[in-house]
Each structure stands twice: as structure tokens, then as C-alpha cells.
Image (spheres, rainbow, N blue to C red):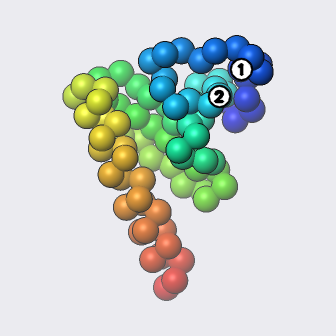
């Protein structure tokens, strides 16, 4: 599921701006290396970071842009919480 399935030279859809590849349900984005993202409907989103051993499912009823905005704010908070837990 994490392997790049889109061959070189094939364009990704315009509704996934910034996506660099796709792996069976999970999008990869240039601005979030190592993070695999499933952009769901109505703002819902799930994301996993296999290298950092964490994942989140975010379920909300909102516009896709609202889900993206919450995602952008949530990822740094998750990383900070993991870093703090690793120090204890």
C-alpha cells in the first residue's frame, strides 16, 4: 500500500495539488515526506507515518478545505506530543 503506483511521466489528478505519488489508497505529498494521507469525503482524513510509528483518523463533517486546514494544524501537534513522550 505504500509503494508508488503512479509510473513516471503520468500526471496526478488536479484535485490532489502537491501530491507526488499514490500507493493504493494513500497519497504522498512533497510537503509531508514520509506521511501517507487518505483524503476522505466531507473533510475526513486519515494519515499514517510508518517511519515514526503513528497514525490518526480524523472524522468530521465539514468541507474538504476545513479538513485540510485542521490537518495542517494537527500534524505538528502530534509530532510535538510524540517528541515529548519520547523524552520521558
Left or right: 58 as drawn, with respect to 38: left
Q: How many marks?
A: 2
Please provide percent x and percent y for residue 35.
57, 45
When asked about the image quadrant of residue 9, the answer is: top right
Q: Which residue sits at x=41%, y=25%?
A: 40
When asked about the image quadrant of residue 13, the answer is: top right
Residues 24 and 69: in front is: 69
Q: Which residue sits at x=51%, y=83%?
A: 87
Could you give the CA–CA distance between mark 1 and mark 2, rounded to whole angstroms? 6 Å
Q: Residue furthest left?
A: 62
Secondary element at image label 2: strand
- Kindly check if marks 1 and 2 are in contact, taking CB atoms under 8 A apart as contact: yes
Residues 82 and 17: in front is: 17
When asked about the image quadrant of residue 62, the answer is: top left
Circle 1 crowding by C-alpha within 10 Å: few under 14, some 14–19, many from 20: some
Q: Would you say residue 61 is visible in this rendering? A: no
The image quadrant where one finds the N terminus is top right
Please provide percent x and percent y for residue 26.
58, 30
Of label 1 and label 2, which has the lower sequence position?
1
Q: Residue tagged by mark 2?
A: 21
Q: Would you say residue 83 is visible in this rendering? A: yes
Q: Residue tagged by mark 1?
A: 6
Amino acid at each position: 500500500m505504500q509503494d508508488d503506483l503512479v509510473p513516471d511521466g503520468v500526471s496526478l489528478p488536479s484535485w490532489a495539488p502537491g501530491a507526488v505519488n499514490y500507493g493504493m489508497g494513500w497519497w504522498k505529498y512533497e510537503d509531508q515526506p514520509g506521511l501517507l494521507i487518505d483524503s476522505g469525503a466531507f473533510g475526513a482524513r486519515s494519515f499514517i507515518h510508518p517511519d515514526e510509528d503513528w497514525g490518526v483518523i480524523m472524522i468530521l463533517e465539514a468541507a474538504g478545505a476545513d479538513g485540510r486546514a485542521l490537518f495542517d494544524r494537527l500534524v505538528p501537534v502530534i509530532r510535538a506530543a510524540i517528541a515529548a513522550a519520547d523524552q520521558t
